[in-house]
């Protein structure tokens, strides 16, 4: 199938077209950039409202150009959208756009869980069977693995998401949003200082390390040293829980998802851990890691092929949509 995907959970107003036959993913994104501070939900919803029509139009233009069917038929078979988790005002704006498009094109609507999409794009691009997934995104941090028809949450942050934790520190320092790439850059000149490391089983916490990092900054510790140590400590926590998940599930495949997955040091640590235990590691290319509609279109196509579509009256969005609420309809019954 060919599917139009729409994403707008937080900052990325994004539309994409996925063609399952050619495996081509066309993505158009217009990013919201706050003038100061972090993401303001109302401002980002206004951004969705202003930016979604143009990105959808460019994606549909691409769909028309690459469609060889009759002019009377729609150039896509379904419209898939992010139902959650995310910021309520953004989700509602994008949900309305998706419903209207499904109606005007006369094709079914597919409701995609944004976190499951972060995972599935890794499985799709690696061609892995049953990986553990580390989702290291802005507002979330989870370990997921498939069992009996669902992606189970094996472990997760007990407080903020990993990207948001880093962004809180950079906001304190006065750097503009998003902070992750700036921390990565500054860390290159840093040396290690001790910061709180909190892992409990396969869960972990960032609130202690964030307070300590801000305190060190106020105490005039070099910002490069704090950035370096933040990365080493936070990513070591994520690597430890990923290894535990691989060990306990018996899986020998790890995929990375989410915007923080663009960080070279995190990828290096995960790759080294996988190498040591003989597991395969896959990090999708950056355009599929940060929020993007490509991953929504790819999972949307799998769901559409499994007849997993939504009636209009059941299509409301859910800001707290958990990955383990999703019945996994698109994987074969023989998989564990
Ligand atoms: P979610 O997917 O949970 O809704 P999100 O919408 O905030 O999260 P993502 O696009 O997955 O967004 O991730 C954005 C986060 O990634 C931001 O917090 C940003 O600071 C972080 N980030 C981006 N690049 C890097 C990097 N090179 N190193 C570390 N963090 C990064």
Image (tube, helix red, strand yellow):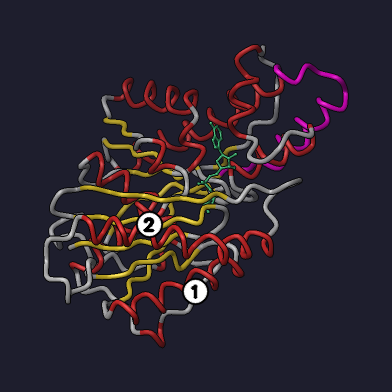
Could you say which quadrant of the image residue 61 lies in?
bottom left
Q: Quick check: is 207 in the magenta stretch?
A: yes
Residue beneath disc 2: 58
Depicted 34 relative to depicted 41: above or below: above
x, y percentage for residue 171? Answer: 75, 39
Magenta region:
204-225
State the residue at coordinates (34%, 37%). Answer: 284
Depicted 210 relative to depicted 149: above or below: above
State the quadrant of the N terminus: bottom left
Could you say which quadrant of the image residue 215 lies in?
top right
Q: Is mark 2 within 8 Å of ligand 1?
A: no
Depicted 278 relative to depicted 242: above or below: above
Numbered mark located on residue 317 in the image? 1
Q: Is mark 2 on a helix, strand or loop?
A: helix
Which residue is at the front of the view, 72 or 177? 72
x, y percentage for residue 258? Answer: 46, 44
Question: First in sequence: mark 1 or mark 2?
Answer: 2
State the residue at coordinates (47%, 24%). Answer: 264
Q: What element carries label 1?
A: loop
Q: Can residue 298 be seen in this view?
A: no
1 or 2: mark nearer the eye: 2
Which residue is at the front of the view, 300 or 234? 300
Could you say which quadrant of the image residue 308 lies in?
bottom left
User: Is residue 67 found left or right of 239 in the rendered image?
Assistant: left
Depicted 331 relative to depicted 287: above or below: below
Chief secondary structure of the magenta portion: helix
């Amino acid at each position: 199938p060919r599917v139009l995907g729409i994403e707008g959970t937080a900052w990325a107003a994004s539309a994409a077209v996925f063609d399952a036959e050619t495996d081509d993913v066309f993505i158009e994104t217009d990013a919201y950039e706050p003038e100061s501070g972090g993401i303001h939900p109302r401002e980002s919803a206004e951004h969705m409202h202003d930016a979604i029509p143009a990105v959808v139009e460019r994606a549909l233009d691409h769909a028309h150009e690459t469609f060889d069917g009759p002019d009377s038929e729609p150039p896509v078979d379904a419209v898939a959208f992010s139902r959650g988790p995310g910021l309520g005002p953004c989700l509602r704006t994008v949900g309305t756009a998706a419903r209207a498009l499904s109606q005007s094109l006369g094709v079914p609507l597919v409701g995609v869980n944004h976190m499951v999409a972060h995972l599935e794009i890794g499985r799709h691009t690696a061609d892995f069977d049953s990986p553990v997934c580390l989702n290291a995104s802005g507002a979330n941090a989870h370990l997921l693995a498939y069992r009996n028809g669902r992606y189970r949450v094996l472990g997760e942050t007990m407080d903020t998401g990993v990207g948001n934790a880093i962004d809180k520190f950079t906001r304190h320092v006065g750097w503009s949003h998003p902070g992750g790439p700036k921390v990565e850059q500054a860390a290159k000149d840093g040396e290690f200082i001790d910061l709180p490391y909190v892992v409990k089983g396969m869960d972990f916490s960032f609130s202690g390390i964030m307070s300590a990092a801000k305190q060190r900054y106020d105490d005039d510790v070099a910002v490069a040293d704090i950035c370096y140590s933040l990365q080493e400590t936070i990513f070591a926590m994520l690597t430890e829980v990923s290894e535990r998940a691989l060990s306990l599930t018996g899986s020998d495949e790890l995929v990375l998802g989410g915007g923080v997955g663009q960080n070279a040091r995190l990828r290096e640590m995960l790759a080294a851990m996988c190498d040591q235990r003989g597991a395969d590691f896959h990090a999708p290319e950056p355009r599929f890691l940060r929020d993007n509609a490509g991953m929504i279109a790819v999972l949307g196509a799998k769901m559409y092929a499994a007849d997993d579509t939504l009636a209009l009256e059941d299509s409301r969005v859910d800001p707290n949509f958990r990955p383990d609420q999703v019945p996994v309809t698109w994987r074969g019954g023989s998989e564990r």
